[in-house]
Amino acid sequence: MADRAGPLAGVSVIDVSTMGPGPFASMVLADFGAEVIEVRRPVPNEVDAADQFTRGKQQLTIDLRAPGGAELIARLTDTADVFLEGYRPGTMERRGLGPSVLMVRNPRLVYTRLTGWGQDGPYASLAGHDINYVAIGGPLGAVGHDAPMPALNLLGDFASGSLPAVLGTVLALLARERTGRGQVVDAGMVDGAAYLLFAQFCELGLGQWQGRGAGMLSGAAPFYGVYQCADGRWMSVGSIESKFYAQLLDGLGLGDDLLSRQYDREHWPDDRAAIARVFATRPRDHWAGVFAGTDACAYPVLELAETAADAHVAARGSVRIDGAGRPHVRPAPRLSETPGTAREPRPAGRAAQCGLLASRGIGAEDISQYQKSGALHLPPAEPMR
C-alpha cells in the first residue's frame, strides 16, 4: 500500500523566499511530504506572489528588519533540514542568516539558494526576471520564429529555477545520509536554462544548429508545428516519423508526393503552406475528431480553461475543477509507493502559529518579546465560542 505521508515525510523546510520560484519549489517539497514553514513578509494590502503556492504549508509572518527577526528565523532553522532563500547574493549574510552562520549552528542543514544569476559572476548582484535569465542562458534566443518568443515565466522561473532547486535539495539530503553534513545548493536560473539546452548546444558544437525558427523542431518542418483552423483555433502536429506523417497526410486528404519528400528542406515551405490551407478549411474540433485515436501525432491546442475537460487529462486527474470552479493540479511525477499529495494549507490562526513555534522550542515568553519588537506578526486571537 502506498505511504501517503510522502517520500519527504519528516523533512523540515524553512522557506524565506518571496517571489514565485522559491514558493513553488517549497510547494513541490510539501506536495511530497515535507513539513514546510513559509516565512512571509509583513506587507499589508499587497498581493504576495507566494499566495499562489501555499498548499501543504504552514505560515509565519516575520519581519527580518525588526530587532530579533533574524534571530527568530535562526532558531527555527536550528531544527530544520532545509533552508530555502531567494534573495540577491549577500542579502542573507547581511541579515546574519548566511550559510556560514546557520550551517555552523546546524551542520546537517541543506542551504538552498535560488536566484536568477547564481551566487557569483559579473551579473550576480544585478536585478533581473525570468525573461532576462532565459535571454542570457539561451532558451529565449532559441525559441520563436522571426522574433524570440517568451514562454510566460515557465522556462526561467520554474523549469530552470524551481525544479533544479528541488532536485538539488533532494540530492543534498541524499548525500547527507552518507556524509552526515549538509551543503549549499546554488540554483541559478541562468545555469538551469543553459542545462535545458543541452541537446541544442550539442548541435551547435557539431555545426548542425539551424538557428531560431529554422530547425525541424522549431516549426520550419511541415510535419512539426502548429496550424490555425477555420475558427481561429489551432492544431499541434508532431508527425516526425514517416509512418505517422503518412497518417497525417491521409487525414488531410493530401497525396503521397509530400510523404516522399518529407525530409527535403527545399520543399518544406511549400508543403507547410499546403497543409496550412487544408487545416484552415475546418474548425479545430473537426480536425481533432479526424485524428482522434490515430498515430498522426495531431492534437488540438487547448486553451487553459479547456485542459481539465480533456479526456486524457481528466482520466489521469492531472487537472481537476472543484465545486467552486477552482482548478487543482496534481503533483508530478507519480510515485507508486510514496506519491505526492496536494494538501490544503495548514491552519494559519494564532493558536496554530503559537503551537508551531512552541514545537520548535519558542515558548510564550519568547513569542511575546518577538511581538513587542515587531519581529513576529501573529493574527488576532480567535474569538471565544
Image: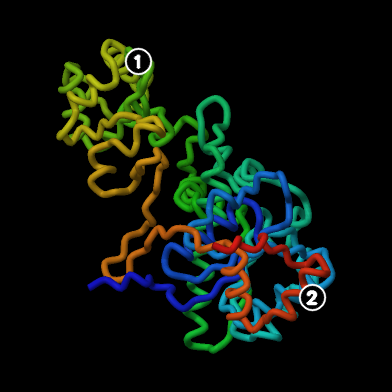
138 relative to 1, above or below: above
The three-letter code of the residue at mark 1 reads Ala
Name which quarter of the figure residue 223 lies in.
top left
Q: Position of residue 342 (x, y in %)?
A: 40, 58
Q: Are marks 1 and 2 in contact (CB under 8 Å)?
A: no
At 31% from the left edge and 73% from the top edge, which residue is drawn?
Answer: 3
Q: Secondary structure at mark 1?
A: helix
188 relative to 206, above or below: below
Name which quarter of the figure residue 383 lies in.
bottom right
Viewer-proximal residue among 347 and 385:
385
Q: Position of residue 61 (x, y in %)?
A: 68, 62
Q: Residues within 10 Å of mark 1 (few under 14, many from 20)?
A: few
Label 1 – label 2 distance at C-alpha: 72 Å
Q: Residues within 10 Å of mark 2 (few under 14, many from 20)?
A: few
The residue that mark 2 highlights is 369
The three-letter code of the residue at mark 2 reads Gln
Which of the labelled discs sits on residue 364, or is there none?
Answer: none
At 58% from the left edge and 45% from the top edge, which residue is drawn?
Answer: 138
Q: Position of residue 224 (x, y in %)?
A: 34, 31
At 15% from the left edge and 33% from the top edge, which residue is drawn?
Answer: 294
Viewer-proximal residue among 156 and 146:
156
Q: Position of residue 152 (x, y in %)?
A: 54, 38
The residue that mark 1 highlights is 273
User: Which quadrant would the C terminus be assigned to in this image?
Assistant: bottom right
298 relative to 331, above or below: above
Name, please, the residue furthest toward the front: 385
